[in-house]
Image: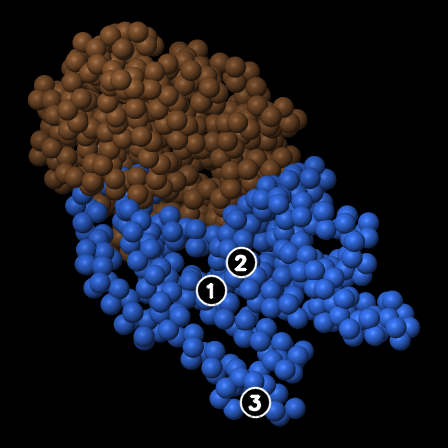
Amino acid sequence: MAGSVNRALRIAGRRVLASIPVLLIVIVLTFLLLETASGDAVDAYLLSIGGGDATVAEGLRQAYGLDQSMPARLWLYLSALARLDLGRSVAFDRPVLGLVFERLPNTLLLMASATALAFGLGSALGILAGARPGSLRDRLLSTASLIVYAIPGFWLGLVLAIVFAVQLRWLPTSGIETIASGRTGLSRAADIAAHLVLPVGTLALIYTALYLRVMRAGMAGIWRLDFALFARAKGLSRRRIVLRHVARNALLPLVTMLGLQSAAMLGGSVVIESIFAIPGFGRLAQEAVSGRDTALLTGIIIVSAVLVMLVNLAVDIVYAALDPRVGASEPGR
Amino acid sequence: MLIATSTRRTFLQAGAALLASTALPAIARAESAPSGGRLIVAADSEPKNLNPAIVASNGVFFVASKVIEPLAEASFTEKDGLSPRLATSWEGSEDGLSVTFRLRENVTWHDGKPFTSADVAFSALNVWKPLQNLGRVVFAHLETVETPDATTAIFRFSKPTPLQLIRNALPVVSSVMPRHLYEGTDIATNPANTKLVGTGPFRFAEYKPGEYYRLTRNETYWEKDQPKLDEIVFRVLPDRAGAGAALEAEEIQLAAFSAVPLADLDRISKVPGISVITKGYEALTYQLVVEINHRRKELADLKVRQAIAHAIDRKFVVDTIFLGYAAAATGPVPRNAPEFYEADVETYPFDVDKANALLDEAGYVRGADGTRFSLKLRPAPYFNETRQFGDYLRQALAAIGINAELVNADSAAHQKAVYTDHDFDLAIAPPVFRGDPAISTTILVQSGIPDGTPFSNQGGYANAELDGIIAKAAETVDTAARTELYRQFQKLVAADLPLINVAEWGFITVARDTVLNVASNPRWAVSNWADTALRG
C-alpha cells in the first residue's frame, strides 16, 4: 500500500515539474494571440460605453499600461505572475483572481456533473452495446449515439430548453438558481440542481456518445482475446464474462479519455454557459476575448490549465491503481 | 424634441403601423395601477461603471435611470418635450450666457441626506463637463454654477450656449450625483459608481455578477404613490434566444432593446399574453449609415457616392432586413426628431441604371470582367441588421460593377480598423440620434476630429461650408435660427453625401400583458419606470 502512495506522489511531483514550462509557453502564446487581434481593451471599453474622445482613450491606455510596448507588457505580466499576482481585469475593473474564483465553482459543478453523467451513461450503454457486438441492440445504440454526437451543442440546448422549459415548464430555462429567492440549505441545493438539469444534460449527451463508442469498440476487440475465449470455454455465465472480464478491461481507455475530455469539456461549456446564462468560466473567457482583456484571459487559461493537469494527474493515479503495470516501468525509481 | 401624437403617427405610417394594434392594450394608461410585485426584465450587458453621469450609454441608463434621476426626462406631451424630474423649471437668458434651474423641494438621497442645488452644481462642474462623453460638448463653455439658495442653480457660460441644446440634452446629460459621496474623492473610481446612490424611485439593492441586478422600492420617493413596483430585477441573459424562451416560460416579464430578435417577433406576438411594443424608443432612434472613406480617389468623387446611394433599395432593406420594423431614411436627422427634420432634401431613389450611368460619367468604366473597381466594406458587428446590410450592400454594389470585399471583424477590431487605422473604404455604422444634432449627428461629418475618436468622421471628409454651419449652430441662441441652420445642414449633407443614410429604426420591447404603462415616454426603456406596474 505504501508503495502505491509513493508511486502516486512521484507521478504527481514529476507532473508538476514538467508542467511549468508548458504553462509558460501557454501564457506567452495566449498573450501573443490576443496581441494579433486588432483593437485593444480600451477600444472595446469605449465601444461598450458608446464612444468617447481620443484624449480619454489616451488617458485610459496610460492608466492600464497599454501604451507600453508588447515585450514590456509581457515582461511586466510575467514578473507579476512570478509573485503569484494575476493582475487586474480592464473590462471588469477588478482583480483577476477574485473574478476567476467567483466563477470557477459554477463551471466545476457543471463540468463535474456532466462528466459523471456522460461517463456513467456512456459506459453503461457501451457495455449494453458491446455485450453482443453486431447485434440489433448494438447497431441501434451506435447509430443513435452518432446522431446525438453530430448535433451541435447549442442547437441541442435550445431544443431541450424549448421542450422542457417553455412547453412543458418542468424546468427553468436558464440561470444557475432562482434569482433573489432567499432560499438556503437543501431547498437552495434542490433549486440549483433543477437549474442544472438542462445544461448538464446537454453537455453530457454529446460526450455520452464518445464514451459509448470507446467502450463498445474496446469490448468488441476484447471478445476476440484468448482470456475472453477461455472464460467462455470455462462455461462462465455471459453476464459474468461481460462485466468481470470484457467490460473491466475495456474500461482503461475510457479512463484515459476522461482525462483528455476534461479539456474539451471546458471548451464546450463556453457555449452551454452562454445559452443557459450560467455565470461560469466559459462565459467569462468569451467576455475576456471580446473585451481584449489580456490579464483576465491569461488568468482563465492558467487556472484552466492547472485544472486539466489536476484531472489528468488524478486519471494517471487511478490508472496506476487499475493497472499496476502502468508506472512500474517509469524511470526515477 | 417635441414628440407629440402627430409625430408618433408619422413614424407609424413610416413603417411600424402594423404593430400599433397589438401594442395598444399594454400601453393603455392605468392610473389606478395596482401596487407591488417584482418585475423581472432581461439585460444583455453588465457595464462595469453604472454611473450615468459619467457614462451616458443606453446599457448604463437601462439600470441606472431607475436609481439616479436627471433634471428632466423626455415626454410625449409636455412642454419642450420634457417632463420635470429634479428640476421643476428652466429658463435661459436672452444672451445665452446663463440658464436658471428651479429644483424640486423635499427630495432626499437614498442615504437620507437632502438633495440641494449644491449637488447639481457639483455634478455639472465636476462630472458632466469634464468626464461625460456628451456633457463635454453641451457644457463646453460652462464656467460656474451659482447656488443662491438650495433650490436654485444658475449655470453661467463663457460663450453663448443655446437653451435648445441644453433642453434636448437634459434627459441624457443631467444625471445628478450625490455631492456628499463624491466630493474630494477620485470620481472615476468611487465605489458609488457601482453601488449607486440616487434620488430615484428605486434603490440599488444588489448586484450578482453574471446573474442579476436588483432594485427595491424607494419608500420616500418624492412623487406621491410612486413607484408602483416593489422590485425590479435585471436578469442577465446573454443569449438572445434565451430572452424569448424566458418570456414564454414566464420567468421574465419584459425584454427591452430588441433582446428578442426581429425574426422571432412574428411567432412570439402570437403567444397569448405576450405583446410586441414598438413605442417608447422615439428619442433613441438608431440610424443605418454607410460611412465613406473620402481618402479613396473614387469615393472622393460625388458622382460615385451618388451612384452608391442610388444602388441601395431602401424598401428592400426595411422590408427584408428589418422585417418592416424600420423606416427608410432621407438624411442625417431622423423623422422622429420633428423639431429638426427636413423632408425637402436631395433623395436617391433606387435606380440601378442611373447609378451605372453616373459611374460611366465619372469615368469608371467596367473592365473585361464587368468590374469598375474594388472596395473594402466593413459592416459594424454590433447588430444582426448591420451585418446583414453588409451582405446586401455587397450585392447591391456588384449590380453596379463595384466589387466589395466584405471584412467582418468583432467589435474591438472593427472599432480600431475604422476609427483609428482608417482601414476601410465603406463601413456600415449604426449611430444613435440623441434628440439634438449637436450631440449626435454633426460629429459624423465635421472635420478636424482627432484619429481614434469612436463613432466620428474618420473618413477624411472636410467641407468648410458644413463645418461653418455646425460651428454657427453651436453658438446660435435663438431656437428658430438654430433650427433653420440644422435644416440647411441636412440639405447640404444629403446633397454632398459625406455618408449615406439608409434607414432608421427604434428598438422593440416584448412584454407580458401583465406589465402596465410600458412605453409611456419616448425614452421609456431608459427612464425611471416609476409608474410601471404589474397587474395582479
Residue at the spot 28% in from the left edge and 40% down from the top edge: B415
Disc with the residue nearer the chain's start (1 vs 3)? 3
Q: Is residue A177 visible?
A: yes
Q: Secondary structure at mark 2?
A: helix
Label 3 crowd (10 A; few <14 / some 14-19 / many >=20): few
- Between B414 and B80, the one nearer to me in the picture: B414
Q: Colour of chain B?
A: brown
Q: Which mark is residue A304?
A: 1
Q: Nearer the viewer, mark 2 or mark 1?
A: 2
| Left or right of B254 in this view: B222 | left
Q: Chain of mark 3?
A: A
Q: Chain of mark 2?
A: A
Disc with the residue nearer the chain's start (3 vs 2)? 3
Residue B270 percent location from the top left of the image: 63, 24
Label 1 crowd (10 A; few <14 / some 14-19 / many >=20): some
**Residue B75 figure quarter:** top left
- Between B524 and B312, the one nearer to me in the picture: B312
The residue wearing badge 2 is A264
The residue wearing badge 3 is A6
Residue at the spot 23% in from the left edge and 26% down from the top edge: B292
B81 to B66, vertically: above or below = above
User: Do the residues indicated by labels 3 and 2 lie within the same chain of the protein?
Assistant: yes
Three-letter residue code for mark 1: Ser
- Between B246 and B176, the one nearer to me in the picture: B246
